[in-house]
Image: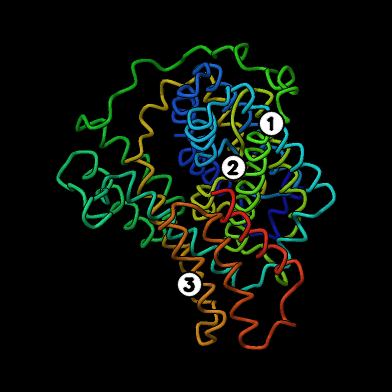
């Protein structure tokens, strides 16, 4: 087992990988609660979606761990499930069954792009400085998510955002959890993020901020309301509206996953000569999970940026993913316990991991203006637009412009030009 997952080469241990897997799972566990709520507003059965969410996470995460040896968790994407419900089903008036078929088609297209290594090739030609910008931008983005989820940062009609009420119980719990986790990390405690979440959960229940679980074990809801629905809706896929939906699912998921893979590979120290080992296998695992998830009854899956919490806890191999999959399998039976993994518990981990990932900015060549501006645009637009793909897209548009202005167009791959044009079309006609 150690040899298969290359423990020696990546300087890790079973204990380290196990703690990392639990840490990532706890950071991702909210999807088991939130995804059924979001998709139920589209008319889908909440219980069936819960089971589909867990099973698709088990399949995708196990695949990426075994095929690519990556410590990454895969589950239904939060951004894409919101797009599924609020834009496609409610906004466009498309039945959820037809929209789910759109997810299935985009997943199949993803698999084909991965098999023919088109996705892998695109990732390889992304300039190194933009890769650093993508990684650090995602760091700022997930730190912002943590600040928002904890109530430390709230919406403000005058200033867009402002400091929240840090005297409220949930927000104060997140602040205390953040401080505890920082102290553990400063003292170099292995698994500090995981232990921080455990301590925060215990404190939350002790002071009545987090409700104690009413039960330990619960039944597994049936998949019958959603399973295989996509195969009965294939005749509805030729409408112009659904073509646009399929394209959007394909486009956003592609760059969300690419950005996450780049960021996590950099964080784990796996990038060699500007290439990500086994990237093709990782992308194939992600694409296969989307196909499986749509058949089971959930929206598009993606590599979770919360996986970086497990990386920070020491995860370096696919064994971390095996542990994550095992935890999702266990969660099918212990769903009542998930109620204690609230946003206040996971927020400190997201903020700290965001800080660690944001350190990638030090590698960017800031002294070169033609690189600094595209990198800055990539970084700043991710949190401000609440979208990884948006930041990547705007960075890709700016990069050729600044490089051409400096008469350095020969340094740019033709694929980068093509991607810039595709992003321009995306912003002009899709968003």
Determine the secondary structure under disc 1: loop
The residue that disc 3 covers is 376
Instruction: Say whether residue 234 is visible.
Output: yes
State the image coordinates of residue 190 (x, y, percent, origin top left). Answer: 46, 54
Q: Nearer the viewer, mark 1 or mark 3?
A: 1
The residue that disc 1 covers is 239
State the image coordinates of residue 286 (x, y, percent, origin top left). Answer: 68, 42
State the image coordinates of residue 28 (x, y, percent, origin top left). Answer: 49, 39
Q: In the depicted view, which residue is nearer to us: 427 or 62?
A: 427
Whether residue 148 is situated above or below residue 364 in the rendered picture = above
Q: Residues within 10 Å of mark 3 (few under 14, many from 20)?
A: some
The residue that disc 2 covers is 73
Which quarter of the figure has residue 290? Answer: top right
**Residue at image x 62%, y 88%?**
406
State the image coordinates of residue 358 (x, y, percent, origin top left). Answer: 46, 65
Q: Nearer the viewer, mark 2 or mark 1?
A: 1
Q: In the depicted view, which residue is nearer to us: 54 or 244?
A: 244
């Amino acid at each position: 087992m150690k040899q298969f997952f290359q423990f020696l080469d990546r300087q890790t241990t079973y204990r380290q990988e196990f703690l990392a897997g639990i840490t990532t799972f706890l950071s991702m566990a909210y999807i088991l609660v939130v995804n059924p709520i979001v998709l139920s507003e589209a008319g889908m059965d909440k219980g069936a979606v819960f089971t589909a969410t867990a099973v698709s996470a088990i399949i995708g995460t196990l695949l990426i761990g075994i095929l690519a040896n990556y410590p990454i968790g895969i589950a239904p994407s939060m951004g894409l499930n919101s797009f599924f419900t609020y834009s496609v089903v409610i906004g466009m008036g498309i039945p959820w069954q037809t929209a789910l078929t759109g997810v299935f088609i985009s997943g199949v297209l993803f698999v084909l792009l991965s098999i023919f290594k088109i996705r892998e090739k695109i990732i390889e030609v992304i300039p190194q400085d933009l890769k650093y910008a993508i990684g650090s931008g995602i760091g700022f983005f997930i730190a912002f998510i943590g600040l928002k989820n904890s109530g430390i940062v709230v919406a403000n009609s005058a200033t867009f955002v402002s400091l929240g009420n840090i005297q409220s119980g949930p927000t104060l719990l997140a602040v205390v959890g953040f401080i505890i986790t920082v102290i553990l990390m400063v003292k170099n405690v292995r698994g500090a993020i995981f232990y921080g979440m455990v301590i925060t959960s215990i404190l939350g229940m002790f002071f009545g901020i987090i409700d104690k679980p009413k039960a330990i074990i619960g039944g597994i809801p049936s998949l019958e309301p959603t399973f295989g629905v996509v195969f009965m809706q294939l005749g509805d896929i030729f409408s112009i509206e659904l073509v646009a939906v399929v394209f959007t699912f394909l486009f956003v998921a592609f760059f969300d996953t690419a950005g996450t893979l780049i960021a996590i590979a950099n964080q784990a120290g796996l990038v060699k000569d500007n290439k990500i080992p086994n990237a093709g296998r990782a992308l194939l695992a992600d694409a296969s999970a989307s196909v499986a998830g749509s058949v089971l009854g959930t929206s598009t899956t993606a590599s979770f940026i919360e996986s970086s919490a497990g990386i920070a806890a020491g995860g370096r191999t696919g064994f971390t993913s095996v542990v994550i999959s095992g935890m999702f399998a266990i969660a099918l039976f212990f769903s009542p316990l998930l109620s204690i993994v609230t946003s206040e518990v996971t927020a400190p981990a997201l903020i700290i991991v965001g800080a660690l990932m944001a350190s990638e900015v030090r590698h960017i060549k800031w002294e070169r203006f033609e690189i600094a501006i595209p990198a800055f645009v990539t970084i700043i637009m991710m949190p401000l637009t609440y979208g990884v793909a948006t930041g990547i897209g705007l960075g890709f548009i700016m990069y050729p412009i600044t490089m051409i202005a400096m008469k350095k167009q020969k340094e740019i791959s033709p694929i980068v030009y093509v991607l810039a044009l595709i992003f321009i079309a995306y912003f002009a006609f899709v968003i």
